[in-house]
Amino acid sequence: MASSEERIPVIIGVGQVNDRPADPREGLDPAGLMAEALRIADADAGGGWLEVCDSLGIVGQIAWPHINPVAGTVAERLGIAPAHVVETTPHGDNPIRLLNEAANRIGAGEAKVCAVTGGEALRTAGALAKLKAAEAKPDAKPKEHNALRDASHRVKKGYPQSYGLVVPVDVYPLYENAMRADLGQTLAEGQAESGMIWAGFSQVAAANPSAWIREEKSAAEISEVTAENRPIAFPYTKLQVANSAVNQGAGFIVTSLAEARRRGVPEGKIVHIGAGASAFEPDSILARDSYTHSAGMEASIRKALEFNNLTADDFDHVELYSCFPCVPKLARRTLGWPLEKPMTVFGGLTFGGGPIGNYMSHVVACMVEKLRETGGKGLMFANGGYATHSHTIVLGKEPIPGVIFPQAFDVNEAADAARGKVPELDKDYTGPATIETYTVHYNRDGSPRMGTVVARTPSGARTLAMVPAEDAAGIAALTDGTSEPVGRSGTISRGDGEDDLSVWQMG
């Protein structure tokens, strides 16, 4: 019978890498970033762990689609052949899911050494695309490389996409604007909270050698629209959204407490894994019960606290996922975390770096380093997709009392119980309606591209309408902050053409 220490999962090694090649042709691809991050993690743990690794978890990447699936390439470059290999989708919660699954494998006696890694090289991929285009047509104007919109896993056509809701930056403002109205905040108050949180992220990133942008920004610099800080999707500016133009990799190694001690890992290096909790929202962004909250997020955070028998007051450090301001705003209210306390250990997705699905691997590495330095406990909340996936987990310098692995972390049943009724969808509605939430999408020069209104019909159904860029009064009514657009009445009309979109006219 195995001793209890054989089934206690711990993190023993972490690694991060930033690749800034002078010539993009010399840059690392995502597999190279992943492999290098694990080599650093292996050295951090004392060396010799990768050669006996029997479980490899890979966070899916989008920067170099031609090398997918990438797990085999990573294993080959490391010279390892683990019995268990898993590669996830590129969603932001998956590093925490892989951590939780690694802990379960150790707890179940299914593995002795688990390695988890991910990496993205979107900056290098974009630079290489521009070089290739210039070589093919030297005098041609460079085409913008947008890997996020072009990624194969993106659904580019459909009802919401027709109204501008294509990628996450198009969708999260729907939560931001609905939540602000629900809280009774003015536009200025909502932006002030976002600016304060993001300024705190920039301070953490400035002090973190693993962050991509190490420059402090004030709340005003982050929230105010300028030539350098253009609007992206209302009310978000460039400095309020995830920075995916990075070349970053991170990874970590999980083993049992018994194995760590047998192989001589210093006690100061060992960090214990607590219980996790995962929940989802419906995949369709139009099948959400509300844009003022996320039942999946709330269930994930609250159940993680319950499973670990902890409260917000018990944590020395937290990471509240920060692709867009609405996410940490919702998460901190669910957790009960004060606005003035730090909400990141890495620096946030704007400043620390936003390597698509792998941000939280960097967070795990930074949280481990923090706990080694200060002791105590840390909570990590991860978000993925379109506010779709939530996974929360706890780490501690000492064991979390009462936590036993393997641990069932799916708490969707609790999320479903808390979720309100989802409105019916009426794609063809015309007539009077009220605004449920909205955003405005902008061109690179800062001019409006179109507005998107999520509206409710008199019967309570949900429908979409657009505000044309040339409707200056309509765009201003959504963005000038003189009155709250959410809840305002208007009219939806539509032309006779098959491809005509519904148009919103403010009442």
Image (spheres, grey):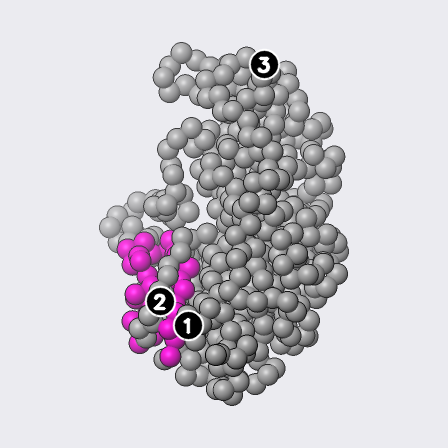
- CA separation, marks 3 and 2? 56 Å
Direction from residue 461 to residue 337 in the image, left or right? right
Q: Which residue is mark 1?
A: 111
Residue 245 in the image, given as x and y percentages of width and height: 46, 55
Q: Earlier in the sequence, mark 1 or mark 3?
A: 1
Inspect the magenta stretch and tell me whether residue 238 lies in it: no
| Residue at point 54%, 78% (across, down) | 5
Residue 432 image label: 3
Tell me which residue sits at (42%, 28%) in the image.
159
Cα–Cα gap, marks 1 and 3: 60 Å
Residue bearing the label numbered 2: 84
Specify the segment rendered in magenta: 52-79
Q: Of residues 507 and 373, which is closer to you in this image?
A: 373
Tag 2 secondary structure: strand
Q: Are marks 3 and 2 in contact (CB under 8 Å)?
A: no
Q: Position of residue 221 (x, y in %)?
A: 66, 50
Depicted 49 relative to depicted 301: above or below:
below
- The type of residue carrying mark 3 is Pro
Identity of the residue drawn at 42% across and 53% down:
90
**Residue 280's spot in the image, x, y percent?**
52, 45
